[in-house]
Image: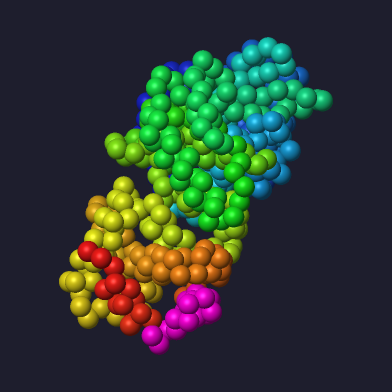
């Protein structure tokens, strides 16, 4: 969600923002990717170093929309963690509301010489509208000079020096003071179940147990991001080089990690988003991880109540679009997703996971759902003609 924000700045930054606002008026789309370097801000590095850094930063940001592993200005050794950060940089220039792909532009905030050819780099994405600066996000990275240019890496390792380590199977848990061992074991067990279903080998996972989501962002080098204002619980994940880096800031007051989202992350390791059918994917996530803090039995109870309250429901008609069977504030529970949870449960029980994978990979959702029903008939023999009857049977066969 992109919107304007009201915020107070110290006098030094007010000068920077005002200068940047003037530059925004004069800048053209052809320089949308170029980092603005405010002349009034003093950087205590020599001009050659600054120029070299800015050129590298421009190249780094110019490649941020490409696959993460293709960015040549990422330090290879830190690619898994940088992948999580690069995901947060994607689309940073755009203001969807204003339909402007170059509304937010990068401005260099700070450079600090950290020694050994390394620099601490801070930059922000700013826009200008209705006479006011709009801060989209602010990032902090490390840069190291190699062969005449700079490579960038996260401050994650530096920020967690002194943290404790506990290894469980293929997972390395990093934590500041204490680790909830039952949650850690549950995390490992859930990953193992996903790996078994998806037929993938267990790969190293570096798990950083954070107090909350603000700490997640801080550790990775995201000083501020408008989208995450007010969010207490969430996590970030990066996967490259056969390794996963995940920072977990809690899911609810009761649980440290979200099984629902973790399922989505694991599936995307083996199946491209172009092939994934979202209702089936969400159905799996409902079944294996619940949704919005509710467990699968709790979600099932909500759907059973909806079905009881709507004895004449036509599930084929309700499958189209995003019809809800329950809503709690902004948290919606979608009928099409739940129906697929029932279908996946039956299919996996009777035939194993391979047919489920075929249904998952039938392609993105279409208006007529033709690709889905073709795959469904092939996998389970369920056609559009008998879809409503079949769903009712699945609902009635589920225990209360």
- What residue sits 62% from the left and 24% below the top? 142
Of the pair 117 and 391, the residue shown nearer to us? 391
Image position, residue 34 (x, y; %): 66, 37
Looking at the picture, how far across and down is residue 363, in whole percent? 56, 68
What's the magenta region? 368-386
Tell me the quarter of the picture where residue 117 sits: top right
Residue at image x 62%, y 47%?
Answer: 201
Tell me residue 188's x, y (percent). 48, 40
Q: Is residue 209 left or right of residue 196?
A: left
Q: Is residue 145 above or below residue 81?
A: above
Q: Residue furthest front?
A: 350
Residue 201 vertical placement versus 114 (above, below):
below
Residue 285 visible in image: yes
In terms of image quadrants, where is residue 209? Answer: top left
Residue 88 within the segment the image draws in magenta: no
Q: Residue at x 35, y 65 (%)?
A: 338
Q: Residue at x 65, y 19 (%)?
A: 119
The front one of 178 and 123 is 178
Q: Main secondary structure of the magenta part?
A: helix
Name of the residue lying farthest toward the right? 147
Q: Nearer the viewer, residue 59 or 126?
A: 59
Q: Is residue 373 magenta?
A: yes
Please identify the quadrant where the C terminus is shown: bottom left
Q: Residue furthest bottom?
A: 385
Q: Is residue 242 left or right of 84 when viewed as pictured?
A: right
3 in relation to 378, above or below: above
Residue 37 % position (x, y): 62, 27
Q: Is residue 38 visible?
A: no
Rendered image quadrant of residue 32: top right
**Side of 123 relative to 136 (left or right):** right
């Amino acid at each position: 969600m992109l919107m304007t924000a009201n915020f107070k700045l110290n006098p030094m930054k007010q000068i920077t923002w005002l200068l940047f606002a003037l530059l925004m008026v004069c800048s053209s789309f052809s320089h949308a990717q170029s980092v603005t370097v405010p002349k009034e801000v003093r950087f205590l590095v020599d001009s050659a170093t600054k120029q070299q850094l800015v050129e590298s930063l421009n190249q780094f940001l110019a490649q941020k929309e490409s696959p993460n592993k293709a960015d040549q200005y990422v330090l290879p050794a830190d690619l898994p963690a940088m992948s999580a950060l690069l995901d947060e940089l994607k689309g940073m220039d755009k203001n969807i509301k204003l339909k402007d792909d170059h509304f937010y532009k990068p401005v260099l905030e700070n450079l600090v010489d950290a020694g050994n050819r390394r620099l601490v780099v801070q930059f922000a994405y700013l826009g200008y509208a209705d006479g006011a600066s709009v801060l989209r996000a602010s990032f902090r990275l490390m840069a190291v000079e190699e062969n005449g240019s700079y490579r960038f890496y996260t401050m994650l390792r530096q920020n967690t020096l002194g943290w404790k380590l506990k290894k469980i199977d293929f997972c390395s848990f990093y934590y500041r003071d204490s680790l909830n061992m039952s949650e850690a074991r549950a995390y490992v067990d859930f990953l193992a179940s996903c790996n078994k279903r998806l037929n993938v080998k267990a790969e190293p996972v570096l798990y950083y147990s954070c107090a909350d989501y603000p700490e997640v962002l801080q550790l990775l080098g995201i000083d501020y991001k408008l989208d995450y204002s007010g969010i207490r619980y969430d996590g970030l994940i990066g996967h490259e080089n056969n390794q996963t880096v995940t920072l977990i800031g809690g899911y609810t007051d009761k649980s440290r990690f979200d099984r629902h989202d973790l399922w989505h992350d694991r599936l995307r390791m083996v199946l491209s988003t172009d092939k994934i059918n979202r209702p089936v994917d969400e159905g799996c996530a409902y079944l294996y991880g619940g949704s919005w803090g509710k467990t699968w039995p709790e979600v099932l109870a909500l759907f059973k109540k909806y079905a009881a309250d709507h004895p004449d429901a036509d599930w084929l008609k309700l499958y189209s679009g995003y019809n809800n069977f329950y809503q709690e504030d902004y948290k919606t529970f979608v009928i099409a997703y739940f129906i697929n949870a029932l279908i996946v449960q039956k299919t996996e029980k009777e035939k194993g996971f391979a047919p489920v994978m075929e249904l998952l990979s039938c392609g993105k959702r279409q208006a007529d759902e033709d690709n889905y029903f073709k795959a469904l008939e092939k996998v389970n023999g369920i056609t559009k003609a008998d879809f409503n009857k079949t769903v009712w049977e699945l609902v009635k066969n589920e225990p209360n």
